Image (cartoon, grey):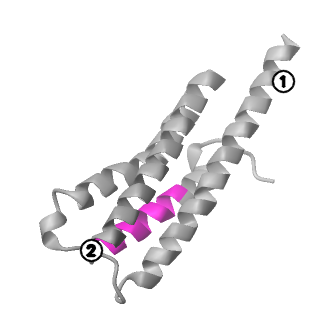
């Protein structure tokens, strides 16, 4: 197992980064008039997922780290919500349906991975706290 020295060594960060890339591609198919509406909202939220993971990694205290990972999870759910609204509005069609389904699956997987990462950090925090 490779030692984790940087946030770029984290699987959850890579999954979040890849999700952002896929979503940016999906958003290229949305109506141009949504550029300052849903497109902007989704872009802000999806970039926040990997950004909060990176920022949390840079924090010294475990509770501070976890706070950023919770924010990351919240942004992930925000993206999911916006995409569901986009589907209802008819922005998902035959042209982008496969990518949309892939993204929704990726969101579920990343949600589980973020939750597992939070649990791991909590357990490590408790071990470290109990040793002192």
Q: Residues within 10 Å of mark 2 (few under 14, many from 20)?
A: few
Please state, as top left, top right, bottom left or bottom right, where the C terminus lies in the image: top right
Q: Which residue is mark 2?
A: 28
Q: Earlier in the sequence, mark 2 or mark 1?
A: 2
- For the residue pair 14 and 99, the one nearer the viewer reads as 99
* SS assignment at label 1: helix
Disc 1 packing (10 Å; few <14; some 14–19; many ≥20): few
- Residue beneath the point at 49% across and 36% down: 55
Q: Residue 36: x, y in percent? A: 16, 57
For the view shown, which residue lies furthest in the front direction?
A: 88
- Magenta span contains residue 21: yes
Q: Quadrant of residue 93?
A: bottom left
Furthest-top residue in view?
Answer: 132
Q: Which residues are magenta?
A: 16-28
Q: Position of residue 8 (x, y in %)?
A: 57, 50
**Number of callouts:** 2
Q: Residue furthest right?
A: 131
In three-dimensional space, the C-alpha distance between marks 2 and 1, rounded to whole angstroms, equals 46 Å
Q: Is residue 10 visible?
A: no
Regarding residue 26, the answer to whether it shows in the image is yes
Q: Quadrant of residue 85?
A: bottom left
Residue 60 belongs to the span the image colors magenta: no
Vertical placement of 56 versus 91: above or below?
above
> Is residue 95 left or right of 108 when viewed as pictured?
left
Residue lying at 45% horizontally and 58% vertically, measured from the top left: 80
Q: Which mark is residue 86?
A: none
Residue 44 vs residue 84, the one in the foreground? 84
């Amino acid at each position: 197992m490779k030692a984790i020295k940087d946030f770029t060594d984290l699987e959850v960060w890579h999954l979040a980064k890849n999700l952002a890339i896929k979503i940016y591609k999906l958003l290229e198919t949305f109506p141009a008039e949504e550029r300052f509406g849903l497109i902007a909202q989704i872009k802000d939220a999806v970039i926040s997922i990997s950004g909060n993971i990176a920022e949390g990694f840079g924090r010294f205290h475990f509770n501070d780290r976890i706070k950023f990972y919770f924010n990351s999870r919240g942004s992930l759910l925000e993206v999911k919500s916006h995409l569901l609204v986009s589907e209802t509005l008819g922005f998902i069609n035959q042209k982008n349906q496969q990518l949309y389904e892939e993204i929704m699956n990726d969101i579920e997987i990343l949600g589980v991975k973020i939750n597992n990462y939070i649990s791991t950090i909590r357990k490590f925090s408790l071990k470290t706290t109990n040793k002192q």
